Amino acid sequence: MNRMVSITASIDQETSSMVAQAAEQRGITAAEYAAESIRRVAESDADYRAFLQAGIDALGRGDAVPHDEVMAELDAMIAKHRARCDG
């Protein structure tokens, strides 16, 4: 099991009130709410960095489509959609 550590952070009164209200609505303490929130943001940040790295790796392998080709395909899709909608 992970060893628990404490983090101290200063927040403004408005944020503190929002945290207290959200925690109360969920039936947990403000500290539990803060810990869960920090974990979610940290996981989201890690996912985003992994997503960026996957793109960088793909570029390094030459697995990329030039911007002009992507835009041409998007323009064709939009034109097809408009033709279908304009009937």
Image (cartoon, grey):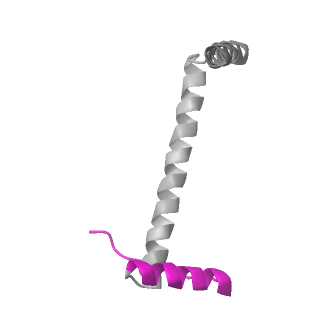
Q: Is residue 44 magenta?
A: no
- Where is the N terminus found, in terms of image quarters? bottom left
Which residue is most to the front? Answer: 87
Can residue 8 be seen from the camera position used here?
A: yes
Residue 58 point in image, percent of width and height: 55, 24
Task: Give the residue at x 32% y 69%.
Answer: 2
Whether residue 85 is situated above or below residue 26 in the rendered picture: above
Task: Give the residue at x 47% y 83%.
Answer: 30
In this rendered view, identify the residue nearer to me: 32 or 8.
Answer: 32
Residue 28 point in image, percent of width and height: 38, 82
Which residue is most to the left? Answer: 1
Number of callouts in the render?
A: 0
Residue 85 point in image, percent of width and height: 63, 20
Q: Is residue 23 magenta?
A: yes
Can residue 31 be seen from the camera position used here?
A: no
In this rendered view, identify the residue nearer to me: 61 or 10.
Answer: 10
Task: Give the residue at x 52% y 33%.
Answer: 54
Q: Is residue 3 left or right of residue 30?
A: left
Magenta span = 1-26
Which residue is most to the right? Answer: 68
Whether residue 52 is situated above or below residue 82 in the rendered picture: below
Task: Give the residue at x 58% y 38%.
Answer: 52
- Where is the C terminus found, in terms of image quarters? top right
